[in-house]
Image: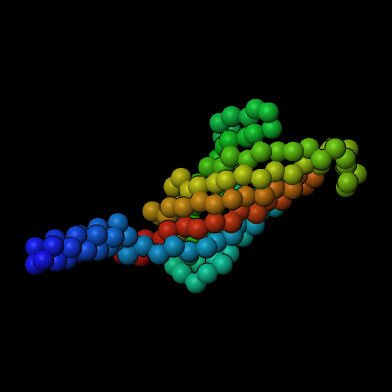
Amino acid sequence: MKIRLAVFLALVAAVTLTSVAAAGPDAAKQRVAITAKILPGGTFVLTPLRAGAMKRDSGTVVEGKTLSERNGITTGFWIVTGKRGNLVLRERREWVDIGNDGNGDGIDDAVAFGTWRVVRGTGQYVRVAGGGRSGHEGLGHVWNARLEGFVTVPTG
């Protein structure tokens, strides 16, 4: 019985130490949203949706290199340049044409949904990791997007 208890306690200790080690050095998950007006203008606002290390930021956003575009699915990069640093995101989104021109600009409107992840960053965004989901509203000459998700911000 004593051997079983010793083995059980050793196993509990090993699992506890493994869990603590997997948590990493002082990292905190934070929920954020990036709201962007891509056309016209190319501007964004990053808003923390939970308290944490990431602070509100705003600036410009441009669509970087498109890696692939086929059957309404686009994979590419976003480059976000704010007052607190630069952030490069990779996104995969799927467009659906809604078949009408609601705003009368001569181009059919579309919507898209997708997923994104952080590739790299500078300033406040150094060593940030994470990702989430995205939604897009493509109204011809007007294009709005919102990206929401969780990022891990190293604090130590």
**Residue 115 to residue 153: above or below:** above
Q: In the displayed structure, does residue 152 sit left or right of residue 92?
A: left
What x and y, as percent, mark residue 129?
A: 43, 52
Q: Can you give x and y, in whole percent of width and height, for residue 39 in the image?
A: 73, 47
**Quick one: 6 or 133, which is closer to the camera?**
6
User: In this rendering, would 150 be left or right of 27?
Assistant: right
Judge from the rendering whether residue 146 lies leftward or rightward of residue 137; answer left or right.
Answer: left
Asked where in the image residue 149 lies, by quadrant, the reply is bottom right
Question: From what the image shows, is residue 46 above or below residue 131?
Answer: below
Asked whether residue 88 is in view, the answer is: yes
The percent position of residue 155, horizontal first and vertical second, equals 35, 65
Kindly indicate the quadrant of the structure image that contains residue 107. top right
How many numbered callouts? Answer: 0
Direction right: furthest residue: 104
Question: Residue 156 appears at what percent x and percent y?
Answer: 31, 64
Residue at image x 50%, y 72%? 51
